[in-house]
Image: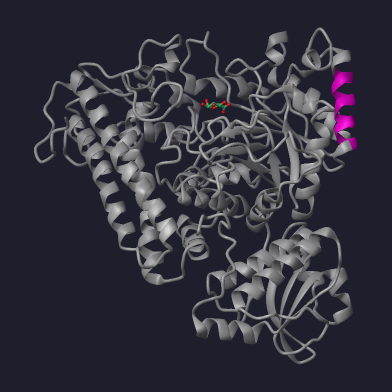
Amino acid sequence: AEDGYRLWLRYDPIADQAVRTRYQAALKNVLMEGDSPTLVAAREELMEGLRGLLDTNVPFNPAVQDGTLLVGTLQTLAPVGELNLEKPLRQVGDEGYLIFTTKLKRRNVTVVAANTDVGVLYGCFHLLRLLQTHQPLQNLNLQETPKLDLRVLNHWDNLDRSVERGYAGASLWKWHLLPDYLDPRYREYARANASVGINGTVLNNVNANALILTEEFLPRVAALANVFRPYGIKVYLSARFSAPIEIGGLKTADPLDPQVQQWWKKKVDEIYGYIPDFGGFLVKANSEGQPGPQNYNRSHAEGANLLADALAPHGGVVMWRAFVYSNEEPEDRAKQAYNEFVPLDGKFRDNVLVQVKNGAIDFQPREPFHPLFGAMPNTPLMMEFQITQEYTGQSTNLFYQMPLYKETLDADTYAKGKGSTVAKVVDGTLEGHRLTGVAGVSNIGDDRNWTGHPFAQSNWYGYGRLAWDHALTSEQIADEWLRMTFSNDEAFVKPVSDMMIASREIVVDYMTPLGLHHLMGWSHHYGPGPWVTDKPRADWTATYYHQADSNGIGFDRTKTGSDALAQYFPPVQEQWGDPKTCPEEFLLWFHHLPWDYTTKSGRSLWDELCHRYYAGADSVAWMQDVWQQQKSKVDADRFQHVATLLDIQKKEAIWWRNACVLYFQQFSRRPIPDGLEKPD
Ligand code: GCU
């Protein structure tokens, strides 16, 4: 049965005979020397991939002939003679690579070359991707360099193997069997990540248990690091700030206490004893009940620097999260991170990145970009996306996230004038940062297909691709992923890609149109709950976010309200501050407007809201149609799985629509517009 276990790394024989024959002629043998673990992994991948895709045994030998594939570094390729690699390789850095066709000894050859072994591995995966997506191999001249240094997955995995906000089974990490038993899946996980250039993984939840830092766990962490290392993946851990108390027996975790500093230094030395290339710590501090430096009246910078100083001698980094808000604070939650972090700009050590969620609330189907981007020019800001679908339909809704990621990355902060995009802040080019990175909260679990929803695999894949190159488009990534994962049939790829691209806006429409946000069911965030009011904290009630009353709806974040808009640069403030120029997708994020306010369509706000909810739910029926037409083009198992999930999504979209329209109708006291069927 086809269960999706192989993800996008499928090397079945290319069905199109003409394509296969061309590839067989272009790739007759492989010349590849070197026996480092990474080069061995690259060779195994190539062998398996070529044998499978070309359906023939491509020999690995040192012959140079027409159709030889040469793979290696400057050193390992040196014996074959003139390839003139020095200069072009200088352009691609430590992890980049070249793929090109050339003549060697008057033979037509293809070359995959890199400065490092991991660059070679990435190049091999790229070459296989070219074959999997049926790209031409003539006149290749590819030069690839990742735009970000740290391309990391954040697993919110607990030590008991439950996964916070995980919808694809239990954690992959079988702590009780480690370090002795190495589940073969660890290597498959590493392959999948390496195939898209993901080079780091934080193994445990940001709501951290300090036990991960003890000698009970560190040998197990080291065992995983050993499996991942050949694939270029570094291991990081979430560190609990109060660990010196909980596992160190100290009375305090005050970052300015010399004993505490000594404790972290020794702990970090111990970790590097187990894992010589340990990446560093991710920290959630003073947020949602987690301990942190503010417990001792110290700042986030003082907290981060404590760990940074312990890690610096080993080359480790701290990823300090800016997702902070406090329940005592009456301030608009959207403003709190900015208020706390901007004054600390420039106060962090060189090996600290501040990790900022894409938006200021919490991974909603749509949010304006976080105002911290562009506002801390002296601090490298690491982007945090949520791949797992906490607020976007969990594992039952098909929601392709690249349009969301791209919208954030392409947004203009105007920090240094027009063109100061979030992407340029994150990739360091706007402010000249050396250290750069992105984190994605993982959607991976031990389900056979890794991600629960078969299409959720595309979000893991796409996250990695964008982390490598944020200039790729959502369409390019969907196209690649579909070809690799399902089929190269154009009659399949085009409509299904269109469906994926549209899925984001569709989900926004039936959950939170026009800038509404956080209407999800309380705590579990599954399904609608705009009525939630009786919770212990204002910002945990959905009514706080939508502010619906008999006059209208929306959160006033202009000067007459919370003035969160003031945290953006003036051109953004100006555009978003006036409902007439504010993009409609953010309208109710920033404005409280009367029910009869006229929207761009000419409809009243109430009618427009209803239309969006209805259009969203109706569009899921369109997605069902698109999928039904693919029945003959994909395997029966995955076809059925996706079809059934779309049926569930349809029900849930109607649930969302009816719940929200009927709930808001109590305030608007207006009829459902003509032409829309009345919910019951
Ligand atoms: C969200 C999520 C929590 C998570 C938190 C975080 O609020 O619901 O489960 O711990 O984000 O990012 O730290």
Q: Residue at x 48, y 19 (%)?
A: 333
Vertical arrangement, residue 228 with respect to residue 515, above or below: below
Please say whether residue 501 is visible from this viewpoint. no
Please say whether residue 462 is visible from this viewpoint. yes
- The quadrant the C terminus occupies is top left
Q: Position of residue 664 (x, y in %)?
A: 23, 23
Asked if residue 200 is among those painted magenta in the image, a careful observer would answer: no
Describe residue 405's horizontal placement relative to residue 63 as left or right.
left
Describe residue 527's horizontal placement relative to residue 210 as left or right.
left
Q: Position of residue 409 (x, y in %)?
A: 52, 45
Q: How many marks?
A: 0
**Nearest the eye: 162 or 367:** 162
Describe residue 441's horizontal placement relative to residue 247 as left or right.
left
Write down the region rendered in magenta: 261-273
Colour option used: one colour
Vertical arrangement, residue 328 with respect to residue 6, above or below: above
Q: Residue at x 84, y 10 (%)?
A: 250
Q: Residue at x 84, y 70 (%)?
A: 74
Secondary structure of the magenta portion, mostly?
A: helix
Vertical arrangement, residue 655 with respect to residue 536, above or below: below
Identify the image quadrant of residue 217. Answer: top right
- Where on the image, by quarter, is ligand 1? top right
Vertical arrangement, residue 614 with respect to residue 238, above or below: below
Describe residue 216's horizontal placement relative to residue 641 as left or right.
right
Q: Position of residue 423 (x, y in %)?
A: 56, 46
Q: Residue at x 35, y 21 (%)?
A: 556
Q: Residue furthest front?
A: 1
**Nearest the eye: 634 or 488:** 634
Q: Position of residue 551 (x, y in %)?
A: 21, 18
